[in-house]
Amino acid sequence: MAEPLSPEMEALCASAIQYGASDLLLHEGRPPQVRLEGRLTPLDSPPLTAEFFDALWKSCRAGDKQDFDTSLTSSGSRFRVNLLNQLGQRAAVLRRIRNDIPDLETLGAPADLIRDWCGRKSGLVLVCGPTGSGKSTTLAAAIEWMNSTLSRHVVTIEDPIEYLFTGRSCLFTQREVGIDTPSFAEGLRRSLRQNPDVIFVGEIRDALTATTAIQASETGHLVLATLHSSSCTDAVERVQLFFPMDERDAVRKTLSGQLLGVLCQRLLPGAQAGVALAAEYFTNVGAVRKYIAEGKLTELSDLIGRSDPKTGRDSLTALAQLVREGKITEEVAASVAENPQELQRILRGISSSSQSTRR
């Protein structure tokens, strides 16, 4: 058990909470910084001293370790702590573990579609995007919706735990990689013996985790997982690339049968302040299932672009909608669009199909 924190450390944690920061970053010889809405912001504090880190290492009972993972509680909030050395000096990164879970409606993700996926008894849901795109927050909001409407046992396997759930309709078993279970794959395998209805896998990183997640969805469980990818079709491709070439056909066929839907999201600087969520997504119905099974990702991408917004939307359409709603600037949208010229055509009401027809 950790020892009491120094007054200086308590003050820094209180500042992070007050500002609503997701992370607190501490480097010896430099002022502390917090991450606010994805951006690093220095706090109005003097550079941190060696004595400060002596006290922090002692509070965390890290001894003489150069790398150490633990957690601490300050000002009523829990933080996941990583102690480290860099360039011969000490540093620490604290991630705030939140229990103020946002409502799905406020995030900018397709709330109705996510509720439909999460209302199913079994299947696989993938939420994708780059690091820091809010994947875990979206799934936490989805799980909290279950907690208010469904009676289910939810097992989470995370690294680290980012949100603490208080059971209402649901029973929660939250396990952290490195503390409660050695790996995502092992935690997922063990979870199948823990009588779950829903399994949340913090990240699919390898073939073993992917295999077990798909098998769990086949055996009557709803599996929610995150994956690093730049688009919905990239997510489908990444899953199959975890496996040897001679296994990919079978993986695609199984995935086409078990996948409920894919959401790929990105957080962008807001036009006025804050951030806006751009969401590309598809539901695995009709021709989508066929294209996944056959590995026809170009056709799948084209189909997403032509889908009814209730079941699918591509990234360009999502960016254009945010620009029209005044949530992001046209410049921001163009900077992240795969095809800025096509984005311009969409914003001006000219579709690719109409261009082709005139030719």
Image (cartoon, rainbow, N blue to C red):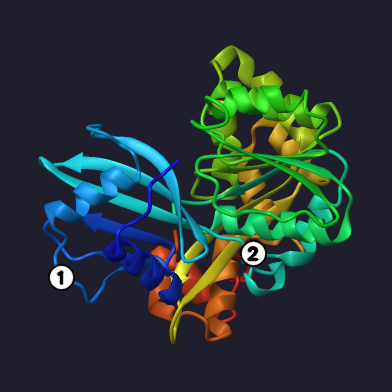
In the image, farthest residue toward the front: 4
Q: Secondary structure at mark 2?
A: loop
Task: Name the one closer to the observer, 324 or 95.
Answer: 95
Taking the image as drawn, is residue 54 in sight? yes
Residue on which the image places disc 1: 46
Q: Is residue 121 left or right of residue 165?
A: right
Which residue does the image show at 50% across and 45% down from the upper left? 229
- Give the mark, 1 or 2, whose residue is nearer the N terminus: 1
Q: Is residue 86 left or right of residue 336?
A: left
Horizontal side, residue 319 vs residue 213: left or right: left
Residue at point 55%, 16% (across, down) = 245
Q: Is residue 176 left or right of residue 66?
A: right
Q: Nearer the viewer, mark 1 or mark 2?
A: 1
Q: Is residue 140 above or below residue 66?
A: below
The disc label shown at residue 106, or none: none
Is residue 39 among the parts visible in the rendering?
no
Q: Which residue is mark 2?
A: 101
Above or below residue 201? Residue 330 is below
Image location of residue 271, percent across then percent down? 44, 83
Task: Residue type at mark 1: give it.
Answer: Pro
Kind of element beneath mark 1? loop
- The residue lying toward the viewer, choosing from 55 and 258, is 55
Residue type of the residue flagged with mark 2:
Ile
Residue depicted at x 80% and y 51%: 117
Crowding at mark 2 (Cα within 10 Å: few <14, some 14-19, many 20+)? some
**Quarter that holds the N terminus:** top left
Q: Quadrant of the C terminus?
A: bottom right
Structural distance between the alpha carbons of marks 1 and 2: 33 Å
Residue 15 position by quadrant: bottom left
The spot of residue 173 in percent (x, y) is 71, 40
Residue 138 sits above or below residue 220 on the image: below
